[in-house]
């Protein structure tokens, strides 16, 4: 073996530290260049400070279905390293993961700092040299490798791993290298809606609603939540991810139709008739027909100008139809979006046909690898975006470790 080669990792986020933690330090000198003062801020705030590390989905074919962009390319990546491997990796380093009811996986300590500590310690145990507050300003190909320039320092690299996240400045570094970028648009956002039915009901949730976008002929089902801004929850977030580009083109102004009950209008109609038959003297305000909160039910009556003290036996056909319309096919105008919690995910990035997904190397460039959100790959919420980072970075490290030096 000759002298050790130098690997420079541009970006000290999830993908960057995971790559550093898995590269063989006997073959490589490893450097991380991170523009910020503190690394891995996305990990720190993820899952409300608990870090949703991955998702308990252990079949690669099923796993890729959670990725609106990148599913085809990630299939081969996940056959090499998937959530079960992520769980083992952290547990081998002393941090156990737990699976919650919705299959999201967190550290048993419920602390994102513990995930960060494991990554930093694992990178440092590989003798990784970490340069904070070192933004890269230029990358150029030399005769025998790569030159990486920061404001006050110049680095040489035999191998480069580019995992900066989806920062516009990062793409400015790639464009001179003739790398094609798919325009960035937001993904994972809530729908801004002003409507009397939702007003003042922040925190009201629906177990399995259906949200339709008539103009796109698409729908998603899942939990739905009334927020300060309008509507959020898995049903909305799935639509925001899958239709990110379409919503961008619409300037985030479009019509949605919501079925708060998640059952057909006919089934809901029958439930009212059955309840009416069994409880004819019950007042409408006291009637508990559907799995919705009494606050929301009273709002439905109020919106439709129906006397809540009226006995259900006296509910007219017209009143019943208006209740059903509001519950199972209520139309709302979406006017804008809001970022989902602290998360900011984008659709877009490095065009995927430029990447060899067996190694994560950019096809046009020798010894230049890419991973994480800088790629045109994104997923719905639930730990999937982190899993793509772990898997891609692991594959890069594996390829470097198997290379002849």
Image: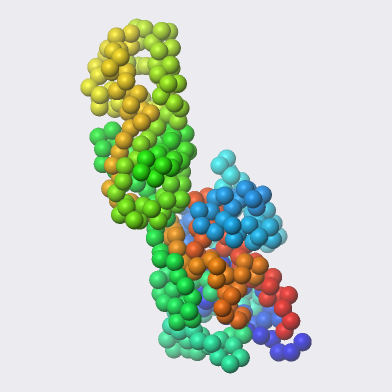
Q: Quadrant of residue 32?
A: bottom right
Query: Residue at horizontal 59%, vertical 44%?
Result: 103
Estimate the x, y position of residue 330 in percent, counting from the top left.
Answer: 33, 32
Estimate the x, y position of residue 344 in percent, counting from the top left.
Answer: 42, 58
Which residue is at the far right? 1
- The quadrant of the rendering that contains the N terminus is bottom right
Query: Which is nearer the eye, 358 or 47?
Result: 358
Query: Residue at horizontal 47%, vertical 34%?
Result: 208
Estimate the x, y position of residue 176 in percent, counting from the top left.
Answer: 45, 82
Which residue is at the far bottom? 143
Query: Which is nearer the eye, 94 or 344?
Result: 344
Please say whether residue 17 is visible from this viewpoint: no
Query: Residue at horizontal 34%, vertical 46%?
Result: 191
Estimate the x, y position of residue 370 in percent, counting from the top left.
Answer: 56, 71
Q: Quadrant of residue 100?
A: top right
Count of numbered labels shown in the rendering: 0
């Amino acid at each position: 073996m000759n002298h050790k080669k130098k690997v420079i990792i541009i970006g000290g986020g999830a993908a960057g530290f995971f790559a550093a933690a898995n590269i063989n330090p006997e073959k490589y000198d490893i450097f991380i260049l991170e523009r910020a003062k503190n690394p891995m801020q996305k990990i720190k705030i993820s899952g409300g400070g608990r870090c949703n590390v991955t998702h308990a989905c252990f079949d690669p074919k099923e796993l890729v279905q959670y990725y609106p962009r990148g599913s085809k390319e990630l299939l081969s990546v996940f056959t090499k390293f998937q959530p079960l491997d992520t769980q083992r990796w952290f547990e081998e380093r002393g941090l156990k993961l737990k699976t919650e009811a919705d299959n999201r996986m967190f550290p048993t300590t419920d602390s994102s700092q513990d995930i960060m500590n494991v990554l930093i310690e694992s990178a440092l145990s590989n003798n990784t040299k970490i340069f904070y507050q070192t933004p890269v300003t230029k990358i150029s190909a030399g005769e025998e490798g790569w030159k990486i320039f920061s404001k006050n320092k110049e680095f040489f690299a035999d191998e480069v791993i580019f995992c900066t996240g989806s920062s516009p400045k990062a793409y400015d570094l790639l464009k001179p290298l003739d790398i094609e970028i798919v325009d960035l648009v937001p993904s994972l956002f809530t729908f801004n809606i002003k409507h009397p039915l939702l007003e003042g009901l922040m925190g009201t949730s629906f177990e399995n609603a259906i949200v339709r976008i008539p103009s796109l002929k698409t729908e998603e089902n899942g939990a739905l939540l009334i927020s300060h801004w309008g509507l959020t929850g898995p049903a909305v977030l799935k639509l925001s991810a899958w239709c990110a580009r379409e919503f961008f083109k619409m300037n985030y102004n479009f019509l949605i139709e919501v079925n708060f009950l998640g059952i057909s209008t006919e089934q809901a109609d029958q439930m009212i008739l059955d309840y009416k038959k069994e409880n004819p003297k019950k007042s409408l305000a006291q009637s508990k027909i559907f799995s919705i909160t009494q606050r929301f039910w009273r709002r439905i009556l109020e919106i439709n100008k129906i006397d809540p003290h009226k006995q259900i036996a006296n509910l007219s056909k017209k009143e019943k139809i208006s209740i059903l319309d509001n519950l199972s096919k209520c139309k709302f105008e979406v006017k804008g979006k809001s970022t989902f919690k602290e998360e900011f995910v984008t659709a877009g990035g490095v065009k995927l046909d430029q990447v060899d997904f067996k190694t994560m190397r950019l096809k046009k460039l020798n010894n230049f690898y890419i991973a994480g959100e800088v790629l045109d790959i994104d997923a719905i919420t639930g730990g999937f975006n982190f899993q793509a980072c772990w898997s891609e970075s692991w594959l890069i490290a594996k390829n470097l470790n198997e290379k002849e030096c």
